[in-house]
Amino acid sequence: MLTDNDIKEELSLAYVRAVASVAGYAVEETRRDRDSIDLNIVGRGPIGGGAVHSPVLGVQLKATVLAQNKASKKLPRTDPQSNDSFSFSLKHKNYIDLTASITLIPRILVVYVMPENRDEWVTCSDDSLILRHTAYWCSLRGLPVPNTTTRKQVRISRQQTFNASTIAMLLSKISREEPLSP
């Protein structure tokens, strides 16, 4: 049997695969996550008028659950105080890898936020398959490296939803050799 963490990992991958497929892009999983890249999203040909042919986006994929706060607003368990952003605790190695300023493949962190109640993670019926809730992304490129080797809290804007149009925008920016941050 899979553990809850294994299931979260599989569902976060299913979410990214579904969103990338709808956007028309391929997802290629890395065999070994040694560089904090779980998968690559690959464009084909020129995209968005850019010079880079067949751009690739590296993704470090994480999942977390929601918790209810007193005002009944659902927020990631890691930060029950904010509606416009949340904190996610990232391993030091992942943080260092994702902050690298110069990489061949640009990379982002994607955090899939799920309900706290396991029974709400996936709903299937004759006419729908629902994965709850959504994923958010951020680029950590060029952020300062901390002096400690402990986990790093990363702020993620709830405005940066990871969806089909986001993938198209990010691959267009890569093709035009532009920074990924909004």
Image (cartoon, rainbow, N blue to C red):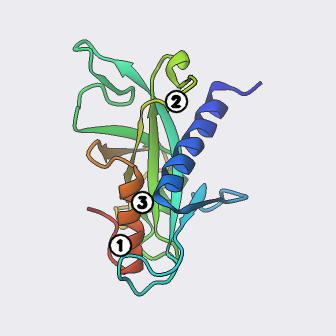
Kind of residue at badge 1: Lys
Whichever of callouts 1 and 3 sits on the residue coming sooner in the sequence is 3
Real-space Cα distance between discs 2 and 1? 33 Å
Q: Quadrant of the C terminus?
A: bottom left
Task: Provide the secondary structure element on which disc 3 rests.
Answer: helix
Q: Residue at x 55, y 19 (%)?
A: 118
Whichever of callouts 2 and 1 sits on the residue coming sooner in the sequence is 2
From what the image shows, is residue 24 above or below residue 124?
below
Real-space Cα distance between discs 1 and 3? 10 Å
- Residue situated in front as seen by the camera: 1 or 95: 1
Q: Which residue is mark 1?
A: 173
From what the image shows, is residue 39 above or below residue 105?
above
Left or right? Give the position of 124 relative to 133: right
- Can residue 67 be seen here? The reply is yes
Q: Please tell me the numbered disc located at residue 128.
A: 2
Q: Which residue is mark 3?
A: 167
Figure quadrant of residue 1: top right
